[in-house]
Image (cartoon, helix red, strand yellow):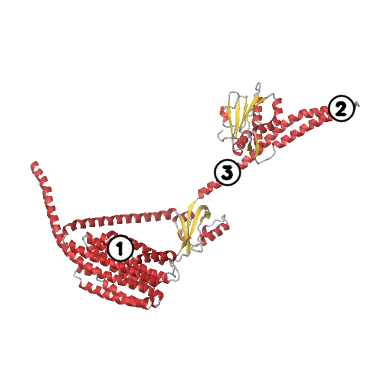
Amino acid sequence: MQKISSQVKLLVPIFTLIIILIFFSGIIIVSNYFKIVSLEELNEKILFSNIVSETLHSLQKERGLSSGYILNKDNRFQKELFEQRAESDQKIVKLKNFISDISCENFQKELNNIPKKLDFIRSLRADINSYKHSSDYIIKNYSEINSRLLEIIVTISKSSHIPKITQNILAYSNLLYLKEYAGIQRAEGIVMLSKNHIDIQDFIKFINLSALQNQKEKMFLQYGSKEIQNYYNRLKKSDIFYKVSTMQKTITKDFVKDNINPKNWYDAVTKKLNTLDRVSKYIKTNTNLKIIHELNSAKNIFLLVIILSIFSFFIFIIMLIAFIRLSKEEKRLRIVMDKYIISSITDLKGIITDASEAFCKISGYTKKELIGKNHNIVRHPDMPKEAFRQLWSDIQSGKSWSSKVKNRKKDGGFYWVYAHIEALYDKHDNIDSYISVRMDITQNELLTQKVLEEEKKNKLQNELMHQQYRLAQMGEMLGMIAHQWRQPLSAITAAIGVIELKAYNDKLDTQIALQIASKIKNFTYHLSNTIDDFRNFFKSNKEKNITSFEKILQSVLVIIESSLKKNNIQLNISYNHEIEFETYENELKQVLLNLIKNAEDILVEKNIQNPKIQIDIDGLKLIVNDNGGGVPDDIKDKIFDPYFSTKLKKDGTGLGLYMSKIIVDEHCNGKLSIKNNDDGALFTINLGSKDG
């Protein structure tokens, strides 16, 4: 059983191989027979295609002349048109006769409607003679007839199963399409040159026809053999191709009608078409030679046909798949745009003609409620009229307009959008509507407003704190000034007592009176200077000036030095490196006074033995260090907070260090910092770095 199974396994592939060989042998034999038959039919079709090409060439001329005749209504085209009609009639009769005599029945069936198409030319000519229709109508109908004739050539190319011949026919058909597009462009050029204005649609068609010619020329050269390519390139070097190309560029760029008239354009393109007709005849002759040659090489055709068929099938499938995917993607994008893009279209008066689903959703209106209404339906009263006057001024002049807009919802609410509006144009390049695309920025605007409100509140709060801080400092200053005034006032009182006593005892002579008066004068001068120092210290000055830490310190010491001496506090000053800088001098004086006064208070409060304050100046850095034991770690991070006070008497405002921090960090663009050392707290003012 196992042996039989092994034999069967061996015989099956052999038997299968034999059947395959027989099958392919039969296919080759049958294919050879049908190839010969098909080549004979193909030869007949090639002959027929030559007649079709002649008819096409004639009808192309008739189309161009008819277009010129319709538009110009003079004898520039009339005589040549009637002569061309007679030539076309000869070609049409010849073509009809060949159709009736063709031997291939299947092919003859495909040509059944050709005579009817050709008969339509008579009625078309009658319409032309009576100027019944426009040039566009004439060009369109001639082109439809020619298109049907070109389809015959394409059909013939499909009936060929020999690659070389198929390529020749494909090159032939692409050349004929190239001729057809050139012929249509000849007619369209006549239309453009005959009109008194540039029609944008005609202009676009004219340019597109040039692109189609280039495309068909590439395909023609792709399919054409080397001999055909060389022949074509030789003819293309003639002056007529360059002349037509130059005229095309002139029409598409400058449109200088004085240099090009319709008849000149027609004649130039006609010469080019005649040259292309020579190429088509060359291809026909070349193709006939190949058919004769291919009759003796049938064995290679079968595989090539399979390859071509598979290739064509795959191309079709790929294009079909790509088309389906693109259709689905386009549908998806449209749905997405309608759902998520806030857009609308209005007419020239601002009446809404279309609105997206997203627009309906954000405004609260249905599409039915929006369409037909003026766009003012969503206008919010907060928006100034001037903004909309500028909007209409811009878009009516063809400019785009972009800005933030506050709109009103159906329920009375509001929303913010960033809107971009542009004009849409009709085929005559006139504005016929406006499109607006918007982006919802409501949350951003609400957040911005909230931030501005908070900034306003903070600014007001800081101003109040600063005022409280200045009042508190003034209170402390008054205390220090009162202390400085006690000694001079006591001296003045004593001097006055001496005067009274001398006067009472009648011992007041001139010399003594002058001496006592001089002392009183010096005391009052000291009091006056103290008042000036106080006034200058708090003078409001928002302009920066050139100063130094040494100058600032000397000004502060005038105020506080007597208080330090009263409390037996030793003040040591070290100048390591002194430089001048530009800053708000009076504000820094207040900061430095606050730091020294805080150090004095803590030293007095803690009753420190041998109290001292060390001030070190090094360029843009000033350090105030005391021996009061430092700031506890648990509150060190809070001392710059507003209203936070460490004074045991609880009479502090808690604004001194907070405002000092604001002044140094924000106003003077520096940094005020604190740390503890072995003796006590160490405050640093650094104007050279924000990092401290």
The residue indicated by pointer 2 is 512
| Mark 2: secondary structure | helix
* Residue 502 relative to residue 636: left or right: right
- What is the number of the mark on residue 140? none
- What is the number of the mark on residue 454? 3
506 or 228, which is in the foreground?
228
Which kind of residue does numbered mark 2 sit on? Ile
Quadrant of the image for the C terminus? top right
Q: Is residue 114 above or below residue 391?
A: below
Quadrant of the image for the N terminus? top left
265 or 30, which is in the foreground?
265
Q: Is residue 387 above or below residue 50?
A: above
Q: Is residue 633 above or below residue 434?
A: above
First reached walking from the N terminus: tag 2 or tag 3: 3
* Residue 161 relative to residue 573: left or right: left
Quadrant assignment, res 259: bottom left
Q: Are marks 1 and 2 in contact (CB under 8 Å)?
A: no
Sort mark 1 into few (<14), some (14-19) or many (20+) by Cα contacts within 10 Å: few
First reached walking from the N terminus: tag 3 or tag 1: 1
How far from the left and from the top, in percent, is residue 400?
Answer: 50, 58
Which kind of residue does numbered mark 3 sit on? Glu
